[in-house]
Image (cartoon, rainbow, N blue to C red):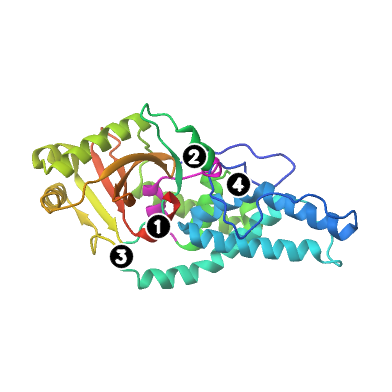
Amino acid sequence: MSGHPARPADEAASPAPTSAPAPTSAPTSAPAPASTSAPAAASERATREYAEHRELLFALVYNLLGSVADTEDVLQDTWLAWAARTASPTAGAVEHPKAYLVRIAVNRALAQQAAVSRRRETYVGPWLPEPLFGPAAAADGGTDGAAQDVALAAERAVSVSMALLVVLETLSPLERSAFVLHEVFGYSGAEIAVILGRNPAAVRQLVKRAREHVRARRPRYEAAPDVRRRVTERFLAAALGGDLAALLELLAPDVTLVGDGGGKAPGGRRPLTGRAKVARLLTALSARPTPALHLTWRDVNGAPAAVLSAFGRPFAVLVLDLAPDGDLVSGIHAVSNPDKLRGLA
């Protein structure tokens, strides 16, 4: 989880984030001036202000919904509302565009939650957040230059780990919004109250309940990237090689395996918990005939993750969660739903 970055003193808004793919449906840069008329100038200014804050909006909404597609829908709605507001001849000027845009985006995301929840009810098997992909990792552990250019936006967003996103799914929409705004983006209670339309006392209770809930289920621990990559390599060697003894040494006693295939790719119907059960399943799977898998490394939600490809196409993304008292694997998140791997194209 990221810390609390500083906010400009004159705006009730959060810091610039560090990751967000840009959908094609909303503007990402200001057009060249087409006219010196007042309406044209206002339109240009509105587009420029939206583009300036778009990555922040993406990071906020993604952390609230866990889906890139839903985030893009919310941002499109935010842009349309912003464009209509700034084009209105009777509306006054918006004093703080960033704060205004954040309020629109967060409330649009809250409204989207109902549709998201309905889809989850009919989702086949466990649901995992859609991975947010950063640049490809080079062989030396650095970042490939070309991939870094392609994924420039994804590098700049505030990301939380896959494991934390899974925990956030268990919060109510309001609790999740308050937690993300306060704990991830550093908003004050008074600022959150304005965004959510709640009084400050209610917001304090939301933040408190959410923080306690998250801490009870998610220790404040993130393994160093080199440790995570080393453990992932050992895990893959043991799992793909069917080495039961090595797996038992790597897995924590209460390890949980969650596979998200969405009914469109291999994935368990329910999470599996327990070292012996998970190790036996993985060794059984390794004994089945499978195509040759190619391993690459990508930044996924701010941490190194393994991408397995077959026949030149992404097959699965593997994100491990490590126990805080060592390098044992406490959680295995495997996303194979092809709809959630589109960001790797």
Secondary structure at numbered mark 2: loop
Q: Is residue 198 visible?
A: no
The reply to whether dot 1 and dot 2 touch (C-beta < 8 Å) is no
Residue 328 falls in image quadrant: top left
For the record, the magenta segment spans: 152-171
Q: Earlier in the sequence, mark 2 or mark 3?
A: 2
Residue corresponding to mark 4: 187
Q: Is residue 313 visible?
A: yes
Task: Identify the image quadrant of the N terminus.
Answer: top left
Using the rendered view, name the quadrant where residue 157 is placed: top right
| Residue picked out by circle 3 | 264
User: Does residue 167 show up magenta in the picture?
Assistant: yes
Amino acid type, label 2: Ser
Q: Where residue 107 is drawn, which disc sits there?
A: none
> What's the residue type where badge 3 is placed?
Lys
Residue type at mark 1 is Lys
Which amino acid, by three-letter code, is at mark 4?
Tyr
